[in-house]
Amino acid sequence: MKGAQILLECLKREGVQVMFGYPGGAVLPLFDVLHDSSIRFILTRHEQAAAHAADGYARATGKVGVCVATSGPGATNLTTGIATSFMDSIPVVAITGQVKTHLIGNDAFQEADVTGITRPITKHNYLVKNVGDLAHIVREAFHIASTGRPGPVLIDIPVDIQTHDTEFNWPEEVEVRGYKPTYFGHPGQIKKAAKLIAKAKKPLIYAGGGVIISGAHAELKALAEKLCVPVTMTLMGLGCFPSTHSLCLGMLGMHGTAFANYAIMNADLVIAIGARFDDRVTGRLDAFAPYAKIIHIDIDPSSISKNVKVDIPIVGDAKYILAQLLEELDKKPDTREWLSAIEQWKTKHPLVYREGIKIKPQYVVEQIYELTKGEAIITTEVGQNQMWAAQWYKYNKPRRFLSSGGLGTMGYGFPAAIGAKVGCPEMHVFDIAGDGSIQMNIQELSTAVTHKIYVKVAILNNCYLGMVRQWQELFYKRRYSYTGLCNPDFVKLAESYGAVGLRATKKEEVRPTIQKALSTNNVVIMDFQIEPEENVFPMVPAGEAIDRMIGGMA
Amino acid sequence: MKHTIAVLVENKFGVLARISGLFSARGFNISSLAVGETQDPSVSRMTIVVDTSEARILEQIIKQLRKLIDTISVVDLTKKDFVERELALIKVNYEKSIQKKVKAILNKHKNTTRLIREARNEAIIEICATSEEVAVFVSNLSPYGIRELMRTGKVAIA
Ligand SMILES: Cc1ncc(C[n+]2csc(CCOP(=O)(O)OP(=O)(O)O)c2C)c(N)n1
Ligand SMILES: [Mg+2]
């Protein structure tokens, strides 16, 4: 079999049903075989979008996403998407063409050192130098991408390797001697943790994206309910615990709820699960959770005690460890007083916004929540739109909120929505977008329309790079340096691509617009012209302790 | 404080770049790094010396090294009873007027040094000793004029 055929055969055996990508000279043999393959191929209009779509597909389904690009510029265009997946631990396999083996290192046409470029933004990468290694490498790549702390893996395949012939051998087993993730928690550590939990008076669970990746949401709910311990989530964790649950405190951190931030600053025990104490969560590190002992459950040992010194580390898969903990815990802490203190913070400092003359973005997100009955997949761009989407839609299930948390990539949401919709065609998929971000991958309208991937884009159009403008307003004396946007007519833009464009300029038009979008069997762009200088509150200024919030307090 | 770390890695191309990239990306300093094949040709062994007084940084360095897929094992030798050597080649001034003095220094370190070559007012000297001894030897020689110096970095085994 030829290299390209071997590659596709391996992908099929790995269960790949769809790939996102873009062709070019160095992947011609691969595309020739794709032409009559059963694998569905989605031609994006930019390689960055292919990487984001593969990522969105992976986040929505839990399967490995696959993207493909040619050598040189095709591969470099993938990198923003790969880095996005890397920062958020998303399983993606990226396949790139490379110049012919004998030309590598010659500055050949469309040559780039892609394994070199992507080394710091992949979990692992490969340059295939021998067609005989290909099957093995593909198998290893999927194994590494999807196990342990997942992440993107890149396979760079010279064009001549794609045409070389060899016998196809499918390796049944993969064995990587330097790669043995720990899954079960150390029993001694579990015992210690259980003791600490039983003694706590003000315990708090701080749950991150790891809970979703590990599929530990049921165990988390069981644990929180058994112990009557409140739960706060990171941006990446949203959906891992039901937002409508009485023990839920919503998101914490820079734009978290006041009560979540007060809770963590007053807790005497923090149980961190699949979260990594990112600076957007902790604020000023030396002031973070000053009274708390910390139990940290994470599959990645290097996440533990990286930013915050931990009292009881437990390395392993959250799902197993929480089950072990549930088994071990016989004594429950008495949290009644603690919960009533939290209840008071909740009543005193709820998440709020003021009504105005113009459309409020928070209202738009709330209405999307109501009209989709909380059952949609929401992707976001980056900026204020992302924070409003996090604050005002209630996520009750995992894999429903897809957002670039670690890298904060503008242009992520739309292609990610396309990927999510391909993976979950029966679901409504909304990209809650900003007018700036949407223009970073607007060309994907073509992809969505051509492939009939009917996603809905809700642009919270403030004619600003809003989040940057907010910082300029608050910290740079309102000097709006290059943050005002002169936008295209998004309705006409949608129409020119064969999508449907809708516009809302008044509050009364918001619900009908969303309803129209939901009932339209096409790609829809909604242009919500919102209050231009609306801010995201509460907000913790960068570098401050996270209970030093400004704004948005009732 | 200096820490000596032994790392077994896959003997594949790109592994050295992964290791050095890890150090530069995370702002860790390498004092020295030596690498070579082991008795198993598919495995290379590195001795990495890092200088840090922060336990947290050392812990991160070790964890990040372990996280690399191509890393097979990482051991902090500092905590063990280990043996270390470093080789240095030194080209020194060897003019008539100072030959005696250089020879006297060589004599003081006679168990670890060798005069390999003498030519045109220069000599090439080898020392194979602990890194500390190498440093002492080099500083003893330096008043007489070191023209070139090449140290291999520490290799260690426990
Ligand atoms: C690729 C990229 N470039 C720049 C930034 C910095 N940035 C963060 S938010 C933001 C403004 C986003 O504007 P918009 O999409 O309109 O969203 P809004 O904040 O107005 O909701 C910018 C420029 C980024 N996150 N990503
Ligand atoms: Mg905007």
Image: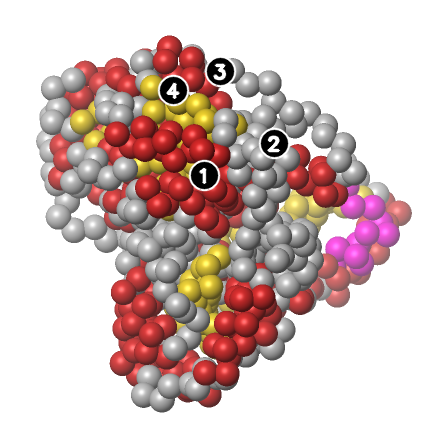
- Subunit of mark 4? A
Residue A138 seen in the current view: no
B141 part of magenta stretch? yes
> Whole-Å distance between the Cαs marked 4 and 1?
16 Å
* Callouts 2 and 1 in the same chain: yes
Instruction: Point out which mark residue A489 bears.
Output: 3
Identity of the amino acid at label 4? Answer: Gly
Residue A514 spot, x, y in % from top left: 36, 33
| Residue beneath the point at 84% across and 56% down | B101
Q: In screen coordinates, is B57 left or right of A109?
A: right
* Magenta segment main secondary structure: helix
Circle 3: element type: loop
Does residue B68 sit above or below A249 in this rendering? above
What residue type is disc 1 on? Answer: Val
Q: Which mark is residue A501?
A: 4
Determine contact: label 3, label 2, CB under 8 Å: no
Could you tell which of marks 4 and 1 lies nearer the N-terminus? 1
**Which numbered disc flags the more N-terminal residue, 3 or 2?**
3
Is disc 2 in contact with disc 1, using a CB cutoff of under 8 Å?
Answer: no
Q: Earlier in the sequence, mark 3 or mark 1?
A: 1
Q: Which quadrant would residue A194 be assigned to in this image?
A: bottom left
